[in-house]
Image: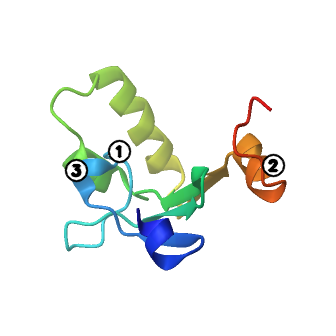
Amino acid sequence: SLVDHFQGPLFVTHYTVDQKPFYMKRNGEGEAECFGLLCPFVGKLGGGSLRVSTSAELLSQSPDNKSHKTLMVRCSLRVREQVKSGEFGIGFERLLQMMLDIRNIKD
């Protein structure tokens, strides 16, 4: 694995857009503006991304099978607030597992 190869935690950035949700901001090169933090024996510890900021971007990136009602709710939020936003998260149990060097979270 990459973590074993580099012998420690590492960030992976700019996943291809087909691997990520349609509402993530794209960089124009077929990549999403996102990251993942990979760590030894716990795997993906955390991740984050930027979101599209306009309803036009959201509509252009939407898959055809997306529910019309759900998409319109997302678009209405972007019409009122064209604020650049992002999100991130971290797995608390995985963080503890890594910090305490516990190989199995059930222990």
Q: Mark 2 points at which residue?
A: 96
2 or 1: tag closer to the N-terminus: 1
Quadrant housing residue 104 = top right
* The N terminus sits in image quarter: bottom left
Residue drawn 81% across and 49% down? 96
2 or 3: tag closer to the N-terminus: 3
Q: Name the residue under label 3.
A: 18
| Distance from Cα at disc 2 to Cα at disc 1 | 28 Å
The mark lying in front, picked from 2 and 3, is: 2
Q: Position of residue 59 (x, y in %)?
A: 25, 45
Q: Is residue 7 above or below residue 94?
A: below
Q: In this view, does 70 lie above or below 42?
A: above
The foreground one among 82 and 6 is 6
Q: Where is residue 39 in the image (x, y as percent from the top left)?
A: 59, 61
Dots 2, 3 in contact, CB < 8 A? no
Q: What residue type is labelled 2?
A: Leu
